[in-house]
Amino acid sequence: MKQAEQQEKVVNGVNVNDFFSTIDAIKGEPQIAKFTFKAVNKWDQGSANRTIVNEFEGACQTFNRKEPFIFQKDEPPILLGNDSGANPAEFALAALAGCLTTSLIYHAAARGVRIEEVESTYSGDLDLHGFLGLDENVRNGYEGVKISFKVKGDAPEETLKELVGLAQKRSPVFDVFTNKVPVSVSYER
Amino acid sequence: MKQAEQQEKVVNGVNVNDFFSTIDAIKGEPQIAKFTFKAVNKWDQGSANRTIVNEFEGACQTFNRKEPFIFQKDEPPILLGNDSGANPAEFALAALAGCLTTSLIYHAAARGVRIEEVESTYSGDLDLHGFLGLDENVRNGYEGVKISFKVKGDAPEETLKELVGLAQKRSPVFDVFTNKVPVSVSYER
């Protein structure tokens, strides 16, 4: 491919040359594929707490953002809070939504499929019998999540549908929802 | 308990009378324990997308917030984005952090344990071989998450440590991370 053509290779806002360069670099040095994402959480009062996201490690380096991202969490009044932020279960849906969308866009770009619009809706059912410990047969978390995708792009409908499938197949947060993650919790003095 | 005492029963910013009234109400009418949380996601460009959180259903009613909560997501430059927001994998940690913290606070309040401070740190390891489809033996999502809790409160250390365990046992998002959630995805024309 000629230099001029290479420079133009941005699809869906994703620099496809950089995407494939990353893949080549990882093939040469697998260690650079390892990332560690981090968060610090501080309780405020009642159901209100804040998460600070800034530093992460990846490609054998440590990165910091210009400004940390701060997320206020709370519960609505019916769940005894003051609605100063979305609740953690809603944040989980936001994580899932962002990850499926980005996975779809990146893999579409890698295949040269130009996307015009992606909208998706999420709904997750949760029964408080779990959280409150009232029924050990009811799980604490989402009993099920339903998602619906609308995708418009410069490809046959069958291809767009396949990309929604590929997003599920590749999305890190979809994997977190649908498979078990080993989580270890320690208590510091 | 006398009326005056009942009115004062706020522990850790949680109205404990309301907490136990909720439990009594659910015992009388199990259906009110069912909640559905929702989100709508719209793709902007590249790795940038927004999640809008507003309406939810619970206690046989539909609720809307005064203003929707809007979450900007992006990727850092090393992952081909512009850092206009935290990335979805970081949002997942924020969800987990908020949920463990609130679970700890509510269950401490229900037991009458006054908490002064809760700080927790999260770190999740993710290998891009999964997302990029370079190695089918590497999962897409977090290979593991490590959490550390610092809790100060008006109780023996053993009790505070037990509360960290109880938070894990009861937290909805901890359940989402550590157990499989059935997720169904449909494609709309």
Image (cartoon, coloured by chain):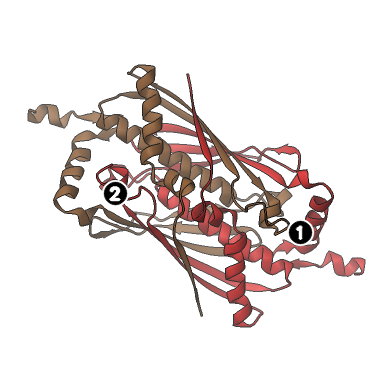
Chain colours: A red, B brown
Dot 1: few (<14), some (14–19), or many (≥20) neighbours within 10 Å? some
- Chain letter of disc 1 in the image: A
Residue A17, above or below B175? below
Left or right of residue A101, residue B138 in this image = right
Q: Amino acid type of disc 2?
A: Leu
Q: CA distance from mark 2 to mark 1?
A: 43 Å
Q: Which mark is residue A128?
A: 2
What residue occupies the far right of the structure in this picture?
A: A2
Q: Is residue A174 left or right of residue B161?
A: right
The residue lying toward the viewer, choosing from B36 and A33, is A33
* Of residues B182 and B155, the one drawn nearer to the viewer in this rendering: B182
Direction from residue A10 to residue A161 in the image, left or right: left
Kindly indicate whether the residues beneath marks 2 and 1 are on one polypeptide chain: yes
Q: Position of residue A125 (x, y in %)?
A: 35, 58
Q: Nearer the viewer, mark 2 or mark 1?
A: 2
Mark 1 = which residue? A19
Instruction: Pick whichever of labels 2 and 1 is earlier in the sequence.
Output: 1
Q: Could one spot residue B157 in this view of the protein?
A: yes
Query: Quick one: which residue is furthest to the left in this view?
Result: B2
Q: Residue at x 37, y 27 (%)?
A: B162
**Residue A109 to residue A126: above or below:** below
Q: Amino acid at mark 1?
A: Phe
x, y (%) of residue A93? 46, 55
Residue A107 lies, with reference to residue B32, above or below; the image says below
User: Where, by quadrant of the figure, is residue A32 drawn?
Assistant: top right
